[in-house]
Amino acid sequence: MAGSDSEDEPFEDALDGLHIDGLPSLDESIKEAKLSLDLFLQNKFAAALDSLVPWSHISTYHALGKGTMLFMQALLTMESKEIEKAAEALKQAVDVCQRKRKKHTVSRVIRRPDYNLYTEEEVHAELCYAECLLLTAVLTFVEDQSLVNFVRGSLRIRTCYHSYKECMHILETRRWSNELRKKHFESGVRMGVGTFNLMLSQLPSRVLKLLEFIGFSGNRQLGLKELDDGYAMKESLRSPLCALILVTFHTLVTYIFGCGDGDIDASEAIVNDMLVRYPEAALFIFLSGRIKQLRGQIDDAISTYQLSINVQQEWKQFHYLCYWELLWCHCFKCDWKEASECSDILRNECKWSPAIYTYVHASILYMMMEEGHPELRGTITDLMAKVPSLKQRLAGKSIPLEKYVVRKSNKFASQGGRLIVPALELLYIWNSFPMIAKSRELTENILCRVNNVFSSLEDAKDIENRPLDDYCLILLLRGVCYTSLNRHMQAEDCFREIISCEKRIKEDIYLVPFAMSELAQIKIKQSKPVEAKELLEPARHNYHRYPLETILHFRVHSILHQLRAKGHVIPTPSPKLTPFHSPDPSPSRGEDIPEFPYLKESPTTVPKRTLLHPPSDLGSCVSLP
């Protein structure tokens, strides 16, 4: 190892000392990276990449830009050759940043460095290094979904996190000679700090406690503020990226990993601003469609997604995002034929999750079959039979939603080719009802279909020892529709009945904890926070090892966040009163760097091993063994 180190150092020193004609300065590199980003947002993807390639082997911003674009292309295609190209580009970018970063002696371990002695190229190299590490870590998970790579990726994220902490300290303590360079640096630091805080704040508390123990911390309000500040620096390189992260969080992340409590008005203002700057930006047109979808303007959303598809044909893989949302918009309208056309495109072309796409397509065809197309049964049976073989694994573990679709496809086979409104169940799992609720017509249309099935299952509960999974699923969907129509008493009756039928649910265990979480949200609307929490605690602690458990924990975490926001939980103490020190110094350095700014949540009581119980008035509730 010692020999290897001694060979590397002269190589780096020699390379740094070379004079290369035409090598862009730091200002020129940032300017060219900004021009490349402008081309990218104007859908000129190849031109954007070509503008970065010539200096990507020696300029930090050219290397970072090239790696970022190939990274995005790899994620959109999920093709091995594109993933390999992106991995190689990011490896090169990390190497370039390493050469440009400040080199330290042994004295760095003993005392904190004077960041005023760093050149501006060195501090920007530190920032680019952190960004490259984050992209490399994410690609590591995608490239090889083994446990070893999962650990490797996690360690890279940790190193990246500490590198951002050092960048934050540089920003706070350094005297800057050039205001524009400082803005470019500051927007990058705020983007990184804000993104980390948002990502970590969305994690369930049991996961967050573990991450805090090993040195991570996250706060949603701080994350949003940091990204807002980064976006407000309109002249900076990363302002459009801060805008993209903010809108994605508010319109997608909060719905997929929460209860849909994002700031839609703020997102709309940001998207409108970006569309003034980039009128044909496919990405921001897509997000504009998403905002219309969230507002219940489904026909307008469909038109906007189609526009996002039509404005560019260079990266057709980007179209898959639009087809995924179009699929659900058509499902909201119960237009199964149009929805099936979108799901068929995804099933045949997109490689993100073949198991999910195949099951979704089969479920939509099933709805068509139930409404007058019996000739589809053979196709549905063939598709359902394929689902288990398409399942993927991440770090040796099944992906939760894939585990769910495999169980459902197996249930289809074991029940002789029968399921209960599978596409409507998917709408619930994908947290679509908050959007559907914006349109009374859409909600009543779905409720009508649910009630038709309910009438055929209602007698099942009177047959002794008969499983009530299907009956309780219909009750859940019925209750959610009633909630959307503000018919809370009827919704409560549905959710309470599910809980009372717990002993007779054999496979779909998720129905009981999800019913508790839905009932808790009604209690919050009724200003009964204590009752809400009494429902949420058993929902997340008493039920384990069912495919949708992760989704439930994300939603419960989001509901508890809403309670805290309304002041119903112990207020968050000042960070000065609850200091949290990282057990590990900055990457490859021996000095402790101050933590990210954050608001530490008050410690919660460790749950006892005894099972928690919902309020006694819910009927014959029992806890799973």
Image (cartoon, helix red, strand yellow):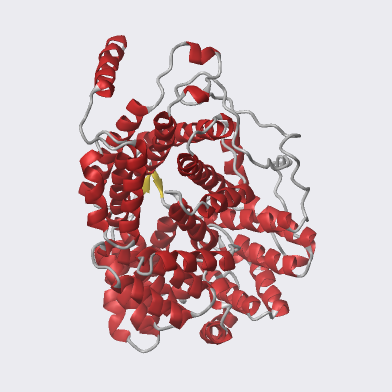
Which part of the image, by quadrant, shows the N terminus?
A: top left
Q: How many marks?
A: 0
Residue 71 placement (x, y as % from top left): 31, 48
The residue closer to the viewer here, 267 or 404, is 267
- The relative height of residue 292 versus residue 538 in the rendered view (above or below) is below
Is residue 331 among what the camera can see?
no
Q: Quadrant of residue 97?
A: top left
Q: Quadrant of residue 260?
A: bottom right
| Residue name at image x 75 percent, y 59 percent | 566
Quick check: 262 left or right of 129?
right
| Residue name at image x 45 percent, y 70 percent | 288
| Residue name at image x 50 percent, y 70 percent | 291
Q: Quadrant of residue 448?
A: bottom right
The residue closer to the viewer here, 118 or 367, is 118
Quick check: 85 left or right of 587?
left
Quick check: 387 left or right of 468?
left
Residue 252 placement (x, y as % from top left): 49, 62
The residue closer to the viewer here, 618 or 446, is 446
Residue 413 placement (x, y as % from top left): 36, 68
| Residue name at image x 59 percent, y 81 percent | 458
Is residue 573 among what the camera can see?
yes
Residue located farthest toward the bottom when viewing the structure as drawn: 372
Residue located farthest toward the front when viewing the structure as drawn: 177
The residue closer to the viewer here, 569 or 606, is 569
Quick check: 436 left or right of 14?
right
- The relative height of residue 443 versus residue 284 in the rendered view (above or below) is below
Residue 262 placement (x, y as % from top left): 58, 62
